Image (cartoon, rainbow, N blue to C red):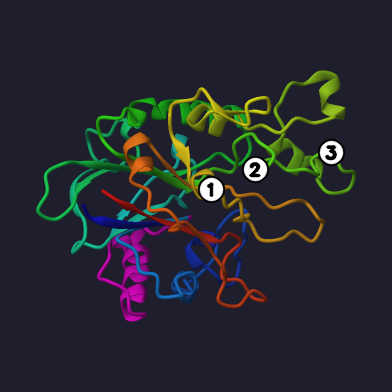
Amino acid sequence: MTRLRISYVNVEHGGRVDAGYSAYSGDGGLYDFGRVTGMLHDGDWLDVLVVGEGDRYELNGMEGAYGAAAAMREAGGPAYVPHPCSLPREGGMFAPVIYVDPQKVVVRRFYGHRLPDFAARNRNLMVFTLPGRNDPIRLVAWHGDIYSGDERLADARRFDRWSAPQIPCALLGDWNSVPSGPDFEPRNLNTPGTHSPQQLNRRVQWAGGPSLAGPHVYDSRALDALCGWWNPSTQRREGGLGFSHSADLAGDYTPTQIEQASGRQSLAIDAILLNAPLAAAYVEGSYRVHEFRDPARPDSDHKRVSLTVDI
């Protein structure tokens, strides 16, 4: 058995700051890689780390991706090797980047979107083994659609092949959604003044007609398709593709979004999902939602999540 430490961190636009920067367009100048290393300030160096929103990291000879790797090494981390990913529907230049410690992980395949034989069904899929072993492990980096629950659901349903129990698989990402259940769903979705129309548009299950005036129903369909829906009668998840949500495994539903001035409830939208063999290998007590090095001046608008499996 080998312990494998994995983590997901959404660093806002990969640390791009400077004149013209916008959280919506991402257009900015140079990188402040201190924001990347700041999210690892506690010295928790991973075997596999997915950095979300690697804004333009793959351009100009992957300068941004390598720059972040160099900064992490200088801060005391391993010599990470970056693997730039893509967004569904080629939705922009701020896709996740998978960083692997080559001393801990042996990459066997990575389905990058620039390959001539790229197929969307394999988007952001990495297949790796552990040193001295031949049994494969799958890992997929993801970023859920921010606007449409229908798109999030369509994307989630494409993971059905990776839920099969023959090969361990982890899905890491900012899902822009949470599963159903009282520990996940916002309790103030219908509280006046906490959600703008734009925020409601991103969170509620679209039905049109009179439902637009409320009461609103949170759109949890994407994560429910993967992990099962919460049955209030039985107090457990039922159905779904068989993935387990890291927060459910740990019983820790700490939000990964920063607090909102409006009072809008922050949610645990950043998550690691494990299929059955990896869920069985989860090391109890290893899941963490990492606090910022300076809560008054956070390095991103998301917190980092991590866990360990023994496989």
Q: Position of residue 72 (x, y in %)?
A: 36, 73
| Residue at 83%, 49% in the rendered image | 194
Q: Position of residue 176 (x, y in %)?
A: 59, 43
In the structure shown, which secondary structural element does the residue marked by tag 3 occupy? loop
Cα gap from disc 2 to disc 3, whole angstroms: 15 Å
In the structure shown, which secondary structural element does the residue marked by tag 2 occupy? loop
| Residue at 61%, 66% in the rendered image | 20
Cα gap from disc 1 to disc 2, whole angstroms: 9 Å
Instruction: Give neighbour class at mark 1: few <14, some 14-19, many 20+ (Cα, 10 Å).
Output: many
Label at residue 184: 2
Q: Position of residue 161 (x, y in %)?
A: 33, 26
Instruction: Give neighbour class at mark 2: few <14, some 14-19, many 20+ (Cα, 10 Å).
Output: many
Q: Would residue 126 be found to the left or right of residue 9 on screen? A: left
Decide which of tag 3 and tag 1 comes sooner along the chain: 3
Range of magenta residues:
53-81
CB under 8 Å between callouts 1 and 2? Answer: yes
Q: Is residue 62 magenta?
A: yes
Q: Is residue 88 above or below residue 3?
A: above
What residue is shown with label 3? 190
Viewer-proximal residue, 294 or 311? 311
Q: Is residue 310 above or below residue 31?
A: above
CB under 8 Å between callouts 2 and 3? Answer: no
Viewer-proximal residue, 54 or 229? 229
Res 11 seen here: yes
Q: Would residue 204 be found to the left or right of residue 140 on screen? A: right
Name which residue type carries label 2. Answer: Phe
What residue is shown with label 1? 247
Q: In which image quadrant can residue 100 be found?
A: bottom left
| Residue at 90%, 44% in the rendered image | 192
Q: Is residue 289 magenta?
A: no
Name which residue type carries label 1. Answer: Ala
